[in-house]
């Protein structure tokens, strides 16, 4: 009997004891290739010496100093590293302890920004149906995952949801990708007009959708049109890069590939790379200036924000991610995994789509490739695939049907950036055998 209140009370999970590069070892000595980076977290694998060294040094020097009294050295340095790396005037960073906290902070910052500039009627939020933004109540309300929301529905704030950019399922045969993106942006515009633009604070979206859709990239031009619509009505654009950011898609920030600058960007997961819990919100100068010239106080905060050890770990991670050639390596390895997957599973009768960017890849599983009909959700195919893979020593991140049971099962792959060629082979072999 375990005393741990695990999220799955009846699951018989192995006990993880050791990390070794791209592998995790359990208490029986079994090795698991971490092809999901946990949940797109462990971008540097599980034993990066530079990160371990940085954490150890910081813990010895100063583990924690409360932000009610101080900033701290690694926090200042990390803010500088992140803002220097982020294209556009996103020159300020608000630190928290994880992804949901980052989303909560961004949503509240959007609301307070409009108070600071004298537009108190703006508080409404718009998000997308195929999205996950976290499990705290505000982030859950923003997310579109019906299964996660269902039992908490009476507790959730009202958030409007528009269609995601889901080319495999939703682009019409008579439509170019460009036209499809324009149609989706028009849907956002219609929703803003329906709510009344003077009441809308922000639109939030994941640049590449992760946990609910298996690495779903946008069509070219989609985010440029979304940015135009937001600008037209004075609505803030929040991009949630908690999962797809920090180099995962082959650029440090996923939005770099969209040719736009958002107003707020949330990051977490790969920011601390699993070595420490940390999240952050990158903030556009326009917003920061409004707070500075207004009340000078953001009405929000957490005890562990800007945690010195967590910031030291994340700073060491940033140094690794900014090494010359690192992003090119993610792109090249991503292409190698994608090629191997297409080669091996492209004709599989139950693999409907293989997609993604960089080392952020997804498989969509279907009962029928031609009709794209998903499996009956009661079969829980994604859970069975996860179990079959674990039995073979492979970690993949599974997801079940999320929108009206329409989209079926996915498997997300987000291996560490240090994945070797041999490990690409191991990943695809084990995944094919599990399928
Ligand atoms: N946003 C996105 C896009 C995510 O994928 C996640 C986690 N899967 C979160 C927010 C929430 O992050 P956390 O689990 O660290 O609270």
Image: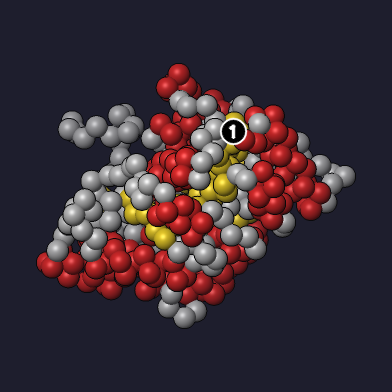
Q: In this view, does 360 lie above or below 391?
A: below
- State the residue at coordinates (40%, 36%): 135
User: Is the residue marked by circle 1 packed among few (<14), some (14-19), or many (20+) residues within 10 Å?
Assistant: some
* Percent of width and height locating residue 365: 61, 41
- State the residue at coordinates (40%, 44%): 105
Describe the colour scheme in one phrase.
Answer: secondary structure
Q: Looking at the image, which is closer to me, 110 or 167?
A: 110
- Kind of element beneath mark 1: helix
Quadrant where the N terminus is found in the figure: top left
Q: Is residue 427 left or right of residue 160?
A: left
Evaluate whether residue 232 shows in this view. Answer: yes
Quadrant where the C terminus is found in the figure: top right
Evaluate whether residue 25 shows in this view. Answer: no
Q: Is residue 178 left or right of residue 311?
A: right
Quarter of image, res 7? top left
Mark 1 sits near ligand 1, with its Cβ under 8 Å away: no
**How many numbered markers are drawn?**
1
Would you name the residue on which mark 1 appears?
Answer: 199
* Percent of width and height locating residue 122: 55, 36
Quarter of image, res 60? bottom left
* Percent of width and height locating residue 81: 39, 70
**Residue placed furthest toward the left:** 60
**Residue placed furthest toward the right:** 174
**Residue placed furthest toward the bottom:** 324
Q: In this view, does 398 lie above or below 356?
A: above
Q: Looking at the image, which is closer to me, 393 or 112?
A: 112
Q: In this view, does 176 lie to the left or right of 77?
A: right
Q: Looking at the image, which is closer to me, 231 or 330?
A: 231
* Percent of width and height locating residue 293: 42, 54
- State the residue at coordinates (26%, 67%): 74
- State the residue at coordinates (46%, 52%): 290
């Amino acid at each position: 009997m375990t005393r741990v209140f695990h999220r799955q009370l009846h699951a018989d999970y192995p006990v993880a004891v050791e990390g070794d590069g791209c592998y995790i070892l359990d208490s029986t000595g079994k090795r698991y290739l971490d092809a999901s980076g946990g949940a797109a977290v462990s971008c540097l694998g599980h034993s990066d010496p530079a990160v371990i060294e940085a954490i150890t040094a910081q813990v010895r020097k100063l583990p924690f100093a409360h932000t009610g009294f101080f900033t701290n050295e690694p926090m200042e340095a990390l803010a500088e590293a992140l803002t220097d790396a982020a294209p556009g005037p996103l020159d300020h960073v608000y630190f928290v302890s994880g992804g949901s906290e980052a989303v909560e902070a961004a949503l509240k910052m959007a609301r307070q920004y409009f108070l600071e500039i004298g537009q108190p009627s703006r508080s409404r939020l718009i998000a997308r149906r195929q999205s996950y933004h976290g499990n705290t109540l505000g982030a859950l309300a923003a997310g579109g995952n019906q299964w996660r929301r269902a039992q908490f529905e009476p507790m959730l704030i009202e958030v409007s949801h528009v269609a995601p950019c889901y080319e495999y399922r939703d682009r019409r045969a008579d439509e170019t990708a460009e036209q499809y993106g324009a149609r989706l942006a028009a849907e956002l515009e219609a929703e803003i007009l329906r709510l009344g633009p003077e009441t809308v604070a922000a639109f939030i979206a994941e640049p590449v959708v992760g946990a609910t859709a298996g690495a779903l990239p946008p069509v070219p031009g989609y985010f440029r049109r979304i940015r135009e619509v937001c600008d037209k009505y004075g609505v803030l654009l929040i991009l949630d890069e908690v999962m797809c950011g920090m180099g995962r898609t082959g650029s440090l920030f996923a939005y770099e590939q969209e040719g736009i600058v958002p107003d707020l960007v949330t990051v977490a997961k790969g920011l601390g790379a699993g070595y420490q819990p940390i999240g952050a919100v990158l903030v556009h100068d326009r917003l920061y200036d409004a707070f500075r010239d207004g009340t000078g106080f953001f009405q929000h905060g957490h005890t562990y924000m800007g945690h010195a050890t967590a910031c030291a770990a994340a700073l060491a991670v940033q140094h690794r991610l900014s090494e010359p050639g690192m992003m090119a390596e993610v792109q090249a390895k991503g292409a190698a995994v994608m090629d191997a997957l297409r080669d091996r599973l492209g004709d599989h009768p139950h693999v409907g789509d293989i997609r993604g960017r960089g080392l952020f890849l997804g498989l969509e599983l279907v009962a029928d490739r031609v009709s794209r009909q998903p499996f009956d959700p009661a079969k829980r195919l994604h859970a069975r695939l996860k179990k079959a893979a674990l039995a073979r020593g492979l970690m993949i991140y599974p997801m079940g049907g999320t929108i009206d049971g329409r989209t079926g099962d996915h498997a997300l792959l987000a291996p560490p950036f240090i994945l070797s060629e041999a490990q690409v082979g191991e990943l695809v072999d084990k995944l094919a055998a599990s399928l």
